[in-house]
């Protein structure tokens, strides 16, 4: 393997610093003891983390985001697992078109999806409801749930299934005792990636959320529109911490490179 | 399952995909169709939305120069962002690929990880770094002697492009990275043994082979940048509008839903045409790479 020259390493260092800087600065400012935005120069303080407790909107929005992410990713898997099994195992007419349809939420700008869902749910009498948010999030996280489940189902060793069938297992038992355990790592990673996508979505959710169903990104966005103060940096630092935890779990269970590589391809 | 059983199960794939298919038709295709229809409805300050078929909104977008300027700004920002990510992301992916195993996976994680971190948090970081004329970025650039007087980043297109490029960079690095994995390192060694210098190797060996990766990364970055909302809304403020923030305003502030729907429909159609068109061009140009 050939080595990088000094110029390449300087470029690399600057590149990495610039990539990390905005995230680092948010986390640093969150620890400021001052009442205004500044890098902590005279000591670290947790006052802005404690201040979150005085803003129940942020705490409420956090629980909405958490529940929404967990539930919509789970519902998406209920639809995605059978669809992934069908696409992985059968060659049937319309297979490619179906796969393209199921991945299409990646291609459609989220602002368009937000508008379409707002129009749809308002005329269905569900405007601003948590149910509407769940359904909308199921659609946007579906491609992520499908892709990782599909990868697991395609790579699965089917001789184990055949052995189970020859021993008399069928239908539901076959799925519950043999197929599902075999594709479980893919399913769990699909859930985690779907959760992160749901937890972070702003563009679509900002159209659908009403007071009471505002998610954390929506609450943060609306707050930033009015003013930027250290409070929103401490909230952001907490969000970054949650995402990092999910990332580390994903990396342990599945390997982050595989998750991200799958994600990159889907953008086409 | 025997072959005969699989053939008998010709209906099985449809039974398995039916729930998801119904979900997608019911809650994705129908709402999208409703949005396109909405763009042909009438709207008035006092009468609200009138379900008639008129071309008023489309006529307004086609004739009012405000919309032409806004769409041109949207695509200009997306193009500049794409160029910036390609110019910096491609060399970085190449450098990453030449690193030792452990460092390689560490830095890959550092560069790709932000992809999954909240866009609001990342953009907030840029807003803090830009922060007025004595923001950190300006202080740094001036102390390095890059420029004499501070340039405004907040509420400018420059700031939007910088922050968007940061948000989109992982997609470009990932795409070029994937192309580099298909590259045979022996070709580089062969070129070196035949007396090619580093510049020639990069220009004649590496560049042609990673070009498909750069181009498919460019398509992803372009389409995501042209429809981006959070970054333009936070960095651009209320005055510097792009397509997504304008549609948001029409829907949630002005309440002129039909006009907002027309802007969104136009954005969707333009992006689909650009993405499908350039995909077809790339695949024809680089057919042998994709085979």
Image (cartoon, coloured by chain):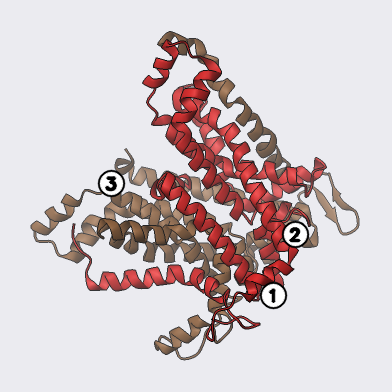
User: Which residue has dot 1 on it?
Assistant: A227
| A147 vs B110: above or below | above
Q: Quadrant of the C terminus of chain B?
A: top left
Chain letter for the red colouring in the rendering: A
Q: Is residue A13 left or right of residue A60?
A: left
User: Which residue has dot 3 on it?
Assistant: B182
| Circle 2/circle 3 CB separation < 8 Å | no
Secondary structure category for the residue under label 3 = loop
**Residue B250: image tag:** 2
Secondary structure category for the residue under label 2 = helix
Of the residues tagged 2 and 3, which is closer to the observer? 3
Question: Who is closer to the viewer here, B169 or A261?
Answer: A261
Q: Quadrant of the N terminus of chain B?
A: top left
Mark 1 belongs to chain? A
Can marks 2 and 3 be said to lie on one chain?
yes
| B14 vs B234: above or below | above
| Residue drawn where x is 83% and y is 53% of the image | B43
Mark 3 belongs to chain? B
| Residue drawn where x is 70% and y is 62% of the image | A58
Spatial CA span between label 2 and label 3: 46 Å
Spatial CA span between label 1 and label 2: 22 Å
Residue A145 x %, y %: 53, 40
Of the residues tagged 3 and 1, which is closer to the observer? 1
Residue A215 x %, y %: 68, 56
Chain letter for the brown colouring in the rendering: B
Of the residues tagged 1 and 2, which is closer to the observer? 1
């Amino acid at each position: 393997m050939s080595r990088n020259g000094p110029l390449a390493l300087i470029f690399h260092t600057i590149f990495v610093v610039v990539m990390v800087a905005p995230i680092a600065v948010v986390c640093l400012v969150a620890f400021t003891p001052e009442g205004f935005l500044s890098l902590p120069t005279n000591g670290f303080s947790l006052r802005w983390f404690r201040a979150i407790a005085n803003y129940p909107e942020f705490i409420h929005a956090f629980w909405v985001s958490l529940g929404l992410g967990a539930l919509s990713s789970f519902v998406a898997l209920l639809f995605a697992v059978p669809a992934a099994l069908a696409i992985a195992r059968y060659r049937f007419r319309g297979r490619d078109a179906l796969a393209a349809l199921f991945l299409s939420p990646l291609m459609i700008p989220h602002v368009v999806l937000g508008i379409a869902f707002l129009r749809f749910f308002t005329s269905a009498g569900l405007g601003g409801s948590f149910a509407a948010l769940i359904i909308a999030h199921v659609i946007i996280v579906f491609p992520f749930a499908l892709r990782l489940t599909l990868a697991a189902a395609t790579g699965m060793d089917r001789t184990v299934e055949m052995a189970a069938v020859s021993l008399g297992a069928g239908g539901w038992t076959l799925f519950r005792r043999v197929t599902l355990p075999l594709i479980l790592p893919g399913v769990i990673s699909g859930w985690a990636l779907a959760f992160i996508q749901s937890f972070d979505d702003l563009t679509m959710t900002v159209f659908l959320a009403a007071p009471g169903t505002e998610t954390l990104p929506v609450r943060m966005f609306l707050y930033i529109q009015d003013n930027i103060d250290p409070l929103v940096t401490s909230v952001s630092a907490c969000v970054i911490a949650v995402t990092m935890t999910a990332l580390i779990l994903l990396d342990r269970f599945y390997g982050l490179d595989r998750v991200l590589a799958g994600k990159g391809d889907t953008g086409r | 399952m025997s072959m005969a059983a699989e053939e008998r199960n010709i209906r099985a794939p449809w039974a398995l995909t039916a729930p998801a298919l119904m979900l997608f038709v019911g809650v994705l295709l129908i709402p999208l169709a409703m949005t396109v229809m909405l763009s042909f409805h009438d709207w008035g300050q006092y009468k609200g939305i009138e379900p008639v078929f008129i071309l008023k909104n489309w006529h307004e977008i086609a004739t009012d120069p405000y919309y032409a300027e806004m769409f041109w700004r949207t695509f200009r920002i997306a193009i500049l962002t794409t160029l910036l990510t390609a110019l910096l992301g491609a060399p970085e992916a190449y450098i990453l690929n030449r690193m030792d195993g452990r460092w390689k996976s560490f830095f890959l994680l550092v560069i790709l990880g932000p992809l999954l971190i909240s866009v609001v948090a990342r953009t907030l970081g840029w807003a803090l770094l830009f922060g007025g004329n004595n923001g950190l970025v300006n202080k740094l650039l001036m102390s390095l002697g890059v420029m004499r007087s501070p340039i405004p980043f907040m509420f400018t297109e420059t700031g939007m492009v910088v922050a968007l490029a940061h948000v989109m960079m992982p997609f470009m690095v990932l795409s070029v990275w994937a192309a580099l994995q298909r590259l045979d390192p022996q070709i580089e060694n062969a070129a070196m043994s035949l007396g090619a210098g580093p510049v020639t190797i990069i220009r004649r060996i590496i560049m042609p082979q990673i070009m498909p990766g750069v181009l498919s990364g460019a398509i992803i970055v372009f389409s995501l940048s042209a429809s981006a909302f959070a970054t333009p809304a936070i960095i651009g403020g209320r005055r510097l509008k792009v397509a997504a923030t304008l549609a948001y305003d029409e829907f949630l502030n002005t309440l002129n839903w039909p006009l907002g729907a027309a802007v969104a429909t136009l954005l969707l159609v333009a992006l689909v045409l650009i993405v499908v068109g350039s995909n077809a061009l790339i695949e024809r140009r680089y057919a042998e790479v994709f085979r």
